[in-house]
Amino acid sequence: MDLTMHWVGYAAVIVFVLSYSLVIAEEYLHLKKSIPVIFGAGIIWLIIAFQYMSDPSHATEEAIKHLLIEFGELFLFLLAAMTYVNSMNERGVFDALRVWLVKHNFSYRQLFWVTGIMSFFLSPIIDNLTTALVMCAVIMAVGRDNNKFIGIGFVNIVIAANAGGAFSPFGDITTLMVWQTGVVEFWTFFNLFVPSVVNYVIPATIMSFAVSNETPKVEEEETIVMQRGAKRIIALFGLTIATAVSFHSFLHIPPFLGMMVGLAYLKLFGHYLQRTHEKTRVGMPGENMGVGEIGDTRRFDSFREIARAEWDTLLFFFGVIMCVGGLGFIGYLALASNYMYIEMGPTFANIMVGFLSAIVDNIPVMVAVLQMELTMDTAQWLLVTLTAGVGGSMLSIGSAAGIALMGQSRGKYTFFGHLKWTPVIALGYGASIWVHLWLNDRFVGVMP
């Protein structure tokens, strides 16, 4: 039933626009982003169900169940990944990295490049949002009295984290969704490495000339000792990624199951840490270890780390998938697909996806693209993965990394401060697309 020109369709679009407007205004309203989209999803499907009340086929029920399976796979995958990241954070891995960087007395320009390059290579492993938050702590610690450096440093981190996340299934929610859908194989994503490097290096090189060569003064020296088991948890995370990839590539099992098996690795090791936990208290003046504690000072609890997962983010994905799924059920995605991908052509459409991502975030845009059930070759799927991943860097509100840093910067990194660098970011965006189309032309005509 095509409801695109019906009052149901108009009402659903209005509800979605209002809901997402509240998400964009999260920084000012302090309303968790999951709330408006979950409420909006409920209203959209309520309106649809009202129209389908006399339908004996239960089409709405089947559509909702299909969307729930889609969300469930994403939810379980992310829950396992978030638990590992939280566990590494609790064991002091990221704090140790931050202190190591601060102690090296880099100049502002050196720190600009070090944090950018580290963000680029960390993002494919622990995702762009987590990477941005880790590097944010470094920038804030070193540049506390230099607002100009904090602002440009945060822009650099956003570009690097988004670019690094674009060539790995684990680097961004959009790449994860593309991989789980099965349209791009795991190792094929890494063909986007060179375009991603270009996307970061061009704007970063131009921006670096605006960064001072002075060396910042760090007032206090901080020492962080990683908690017992930290390195083994890092190794288990690597093993978990290998398990998920193997399940999907060799056994054709959805990757979320491999991640859940990996979560079991962590829980078994966590049980071992709990059973062998010994609290040691030794005075260590001058070292920031709580109350001068060393050794296994905190009892590890894997369930506590699950509880600390980004539940607002996970529920936000539920709301977005349900909202966009409702619009697709009404017929709007078919309409958009016909106009963008058939009339305008897939290359133009996929380039436009990047600009849309900068305005309304890449997650709902990619959800919409995947729910269109397009027939594209691997070259075009790689293109839309690239553009959705890096297009959000053009505006501070275009990616989860940018939005998170706006909240962490205490007004030092702003929408308009980022907007000043949008032209050079767009230059990197265009260059990365050109490099992809030139370098990965062997995938043209290769169907997933």
Image: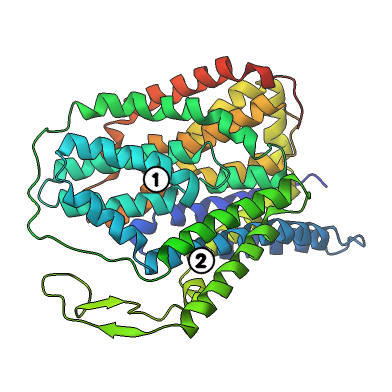
Asked whether, in this view, residue 210 is left or right of residue 261, the answer is: left
Number of disc labels: 2
Front position in the image: 410 or 203? 203
Residue 83 badge: 2
> Residue 155's spot in the image, x, y percent?
30, 39
Q: Of label 2 and label 1, which has the lower sequence position?
A: 2
Asked whether, in this view, residue 115 is left or right of residue 335, the answer is: left
Element under label 1?
A: loop
Q: Quick one: which residue is furthest to the top in this view?
A: 438
Residue 302 badge: none
Dot 1: within a 10 Å radius of its alpha carbon, few (fewer than 14), some, or many (20 or more) residues? many
* Type of the residue with mark 2: Thr
> Residue 291's spot in the image, x, y percent?
20, 80
State the residue position of label 1: 397
Residue at left offset 44%, top offset 77%: 300
> Residue 123's spot in the image, x, y percent?
44, 45
> Residue 32's spot in the image, x, y percent?
44, 65
The chosen color scheme is rainbow
Could you tell me if residue 155 is visible in this image? Answer: no
Element under label 2?
A: helix
* Marks 2 and 1, how far apart at CA: 26 Å
Q: Is residue 334 above or below residue 329?
A: above
* Type of the residue with mark 1: Ile
Residue at left offset 44%, top offset 19%: 431
Which is more foreground, mark 2 or mark 1?
Answer: 2
Asked whether, in this view, residue 51 is left or right of residue 197, the answer is: right
Q: Is residue 431 above or below residue 316?
A: above
Front position in the image: 436 or 39? 436
